[in-house]
Amino acid sequence: MRYTDRKGAGTERVVWPAAIGFFEAAEVLVACCETRGDFRHFHLDRIAEAAPAGGRFPRRRRVLLADWRAAQAIEGF
């Protein structure tokens, strides 16, 4: 996907989506980012372009989501 950060710099990323969150101030995509090798939160309004890359996720979405929850110390799901 092509993404513009808060400073206006554009980047291209390969991400593996785990969830979309809707908050009062922003809507975000939670994804494992191959560029950073970690989970990142991307504002939906800053995604300039996105297209499926083909292939399969490296892990099941359920596992990605569980890994993100553990990284964020979120319990109870």
Image: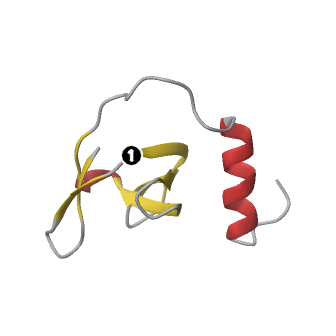
Is 3 or 57 nearer to us in this picture?
Answer: 57
The location of residue 61, given as percent across then percent down, is: 66, 37
For image coordinates 33% across by 51% down, the residue present is 13
In the image, farthest residue toward the right: 76
- State the image coordinates of residue 35 (x, y, percent, origin top left): 40, 58
Q: Which amino acid does label 1 sit on?
A: Val
Residue 42: quarter of image: bottom left
Relative to 19, residue 73 above or below: below
Residue under label 1, please give it.
14
- The image's colour scheme reads secondary structure
Q: Which residue lies furthest to the bottom in this view?
A: 7
Relative to 19, say whether 6 is above or below: below
**Left or right of 32, for residue 61:** right
Q: Which of 32 and 43 is in front in this view?
A: 32
The number of numbered badges drawn on the structure is 1
Figure quadrant of residue 28: bottom left
Residue 63 image offset from top left, x and y in percent: 74, 44
Q: Is residue 52 left or right of residue 30?
A: left
**Residue 2 appears at what percent x and percent y?**
23, 48
